[in-house]
Amino acid sequence: MAHEPTSDGRTSNRGFASMNQERQRQIASMGGKAVPDEKRSFSQNRRLAAEAGRKGGQSVPGSKRSFSQNRELAAVAGRKGGQSVPDEKRSFSQNPELAAEAGRKGGQASHGGGASSAAAEAHAKEAKEAADRQRAPGGSEKE
């Protein structure tokens, strides 16, 4: 049975969807406030949250992890993600020193040691140059 839209475009006067956005927000926020902070284990224990995230990722078989199986697909997704962020919000492209610092930290976390500062800065410079080429009109990167 089809409902005729009301004067404000709704098709029903009942239910959550028929409420104005402010009332929907009020009700939705109650769910987040229902559990006290001390009972939110992930907000209290970052290590527990990280462990749960790893378990979630490990529960997916390798054959279903499309990015690990298809590097080109991962590269395309990364480019799209980067393009969705305005230039002024791209902190690494605006601040090569920040990119170098992040690269050093990432290398230390994944390899148990630190890459040399010169190597990290060289990688950051290469990444910045690649990003600049991609944004330049007629750049060599494909979209």
Image (cartoon, rainbow, N blue to C red):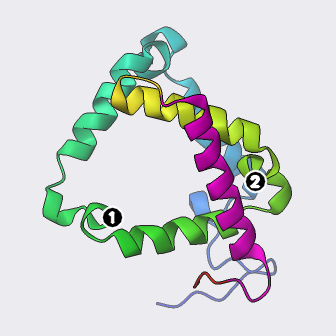
Identified at 41% across, 67% down, the residue is 74
User: In the rendering, at what x and y percent does residue 50 appear?
Assistant: 37, 27
Query: Seen in the image, is 120 located left or right of residue 99?
Result: left
Query: Seen in the image, is 27 located left or right of residue 107?
Result: right
User: In the rendering, at what x and y percent does residue 122 appear?
Assistant: 62, 46
Identified at 42% across, 27% down, the residue is 109
- Residue 30 visible somewhere in the drawing: yes
Q: Nearer the viewer, residue 1 or 47?
A: 47
* Mark 2 secondary-structure assignment: helix
- Residue 29 visible somewhere in the drawing: no
Identified at 24% across, 67% down, the residue is 69
Q: Amino acid at mark 1?
A: Phe
Q: Main secondary structure of the magenta part?
A: helix
* Mark 1 secondary-structure assignment: helix
Residue 93's tag is 2
10 Å crowding of disc 1: few (<14), some (14-19), many (20+): some
Whether pointer 1 and pointer 2 mark residues with C-beta atoms closer than 8 Å, the reply is: no
Going from N to C along the chain, the mark reached first, 1 or 2, is 1
Quadrant, the C terminus: bottom right
Q: Amino acid at mark 2?
A: Ser
Identified at 33% across, 64% down, the residue is 67
Q: Nearer the viewer, residue 56 or 11?
A: 56
Q: Nearer the viewer, residue 113 or 105?
A: 113
- Is 125 in the magenta? yes
- Give the magenta part as a residue range: 115-139
10 Å crowding of disc 2: few (<14), some (14-19), many (20+): many
- Is 27 placed above or below 140 here? above
Residue 67's tag is 1
